[in-house]
């Protein structure tokens, strides 16, 4: 079939344009490939640009058998793990390793995460909390000045409003930690720990403030330094939280070094099946420019440095120490 010259011209232009487009596409693909080889994919960019340079602050008490715990749960006891065949403890010299047996009377121990099933079995246990709890924006509201005037002071709605006037609205889905500096009283001395756990005088969080934070600001959960939410006879704040499906953090430490806004919090806890409490670890991740005293990612993270003193079982303390 004979093709008219105008049509031939159009076809030639189309072919040329197609070839050019193909060449551009090949070039673009090559550029994308080069970029993929030189740039971090996905969230790795976030780590490279921010998290690798951030300051990390541990908000968690170390777990020891003598730390404060409610008298209704009883004490904990640590000991070397025993070989069931020989009845003797494993040793570095004999077995090449050692391990520890923890006999803890409760999952409400130390720095913790309370799931709502702690009080309300119709809600989630510790193993049913979603993985989305892992990393959240962190807000720290200080009531240190108020507690100096009244050791039983509880966070009020007015404190939340004053905080927002100075720092902006609390973001939905965030974790709000209430700083009181009560954690500075924390102790491993058995007698002092017993007194501290039984002391009815400690700072708290009012029910009205909890309702504002959860129902109007829609936070994920709040945390506080003492081992209870409030000093009311019925623990009304904790009762309300648990019976409305909310979690809370207790026994939090080191909030003095965390900026009021701008940090993240990493949240970790054991996933006990049907558990009603979590031995939690909270780590604040703060901007490099913050004045916090946190540690930075360094070349000493892996391998970890050797210690000049060996870790050995200390019978007096009831755990290993250097």
Image (cartoon, grey):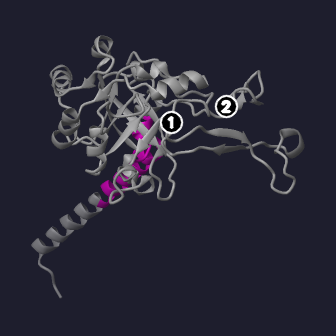
Q: Quadrant of the C terminus?
A: top right
The residue that appears at 29% across and 12% down in the rendered structure is 145
Q: Position of residue 250 (x, y in %)?
A: 41, 35
Q: Is residue 220 above or below residue 245?
A: above
Q: Is residue 311 above or below residue 142?
A: below
Residue situated in front as seen by the camera: 156 or 30: 156
Magenta segment: 22-48
Identify the mark at residue 202; answer none if there is no mark.
Answer: none
| Category of crowding for the residue at label 2, using alpha-carbon neighbours closer than 10 angstroms: few (below 14), some (14–19), many (at least 20) | few
Residue under numbered circle 2: 304
In this image, 275 relative to 170: left or right?
Answer: right
Residue situated in front as seen by the camera: 142 or 107: 107
The residue that appears at 29% across and 11% down in the rendered structure is 149
Q: Position of residue 167 (x, y in %)?
A: 21, 23
Res 207 → quadrant:
top left
In this image, 107 relative to 65: left or right?
Answer: left
Q: Secondary structure at mark 1?
A: loop
Res 311 → quadrant:
top right
Residue situated in front as seen by the camera: 197 or 291: 197
Q: Position of residue 199 (x, y in %)?
A: 43, 25
Residue under numbered circle 1: 71
Residue situated in front as seen by the camera: 210 or 16: 210
Given contact means CB atoms under 8 Å apart, are the residues at marks 2 and 1 in contact?
no
Mark 2 or mark 1, earlier in chain: 1
| Category of crowding for the residue at label 1, using alpha-carbon neighbours closer than 10 angstroms: few (below 14), some (14–19), many (at least 20) | few
Residue 58 in sight:
no
User: Magenta stretch: dominant SS?
Assistant: helix
Residue 285 in sight:
yes
């Amino acid at each position: 079939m004979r093709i008219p010259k105008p049509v031939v011209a159009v076809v030639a232009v189309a072919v040329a344009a197609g070839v050019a487009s193909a060449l551009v596409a090949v070039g673009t693909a090559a550029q994308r490939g080069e970029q993929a080889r030189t740039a971090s994919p996905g969230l790795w960019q976030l780590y490279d640009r921010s998290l690798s340079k951030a300051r990390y602050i541990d908000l968690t008490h170390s777990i020891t058998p003598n730390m404060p715990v409610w008298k209704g749960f009883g004490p904990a006891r640590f000991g070397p793990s025993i070989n069931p065949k020989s009845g003797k403890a494993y040793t570095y010299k004999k077995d090449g390793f050692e391990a520890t047996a923890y006999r803890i009377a409760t999952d409400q121990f130390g720095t913790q995460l309370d799931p709502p099933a702690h009080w309300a079995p119709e809600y989630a246990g510790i193993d049913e909390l979603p993985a989305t709890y892992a990393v959240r924006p962190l807000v720290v509201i200080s009531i240190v000045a108020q507690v100096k005037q009244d050791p039983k002071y509880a966070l009020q709605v007015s404190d939340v409003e004053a905080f927002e006037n100075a720092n902006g609205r609390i973001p939905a889905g965030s974790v709000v930690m209430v700083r009181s500096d009560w954690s500075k009283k924390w102790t491993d001395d058995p007698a002092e720990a017993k007194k501290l756990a039984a002391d009815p005088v400690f700072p708290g969080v009012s029910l009205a403030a909890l309702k504002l934070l959860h129902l109007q600001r829609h936070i994920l959960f709040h945390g506080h330094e003492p081992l209870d939410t409030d000093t009311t006879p019925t623990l009304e704040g904790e009762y309300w939280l648990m019976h409305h499906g909310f979690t809370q953090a207790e026994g939090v430490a080191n909030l003095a070094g965390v900026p009021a806004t701008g940090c993240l919090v990493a949240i970790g806890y054991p996933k006990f099946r049907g558990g009603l409490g979590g031995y939690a670890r909270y780590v604040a991740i703060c901007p490099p420019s913050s004045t916090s005293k946190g540690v930075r990612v360094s070349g000493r993270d892996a391998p970890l440095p050797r210690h000049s003193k060996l870790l050995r079982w200390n019978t007096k303390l009831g755990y290993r120490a250097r």
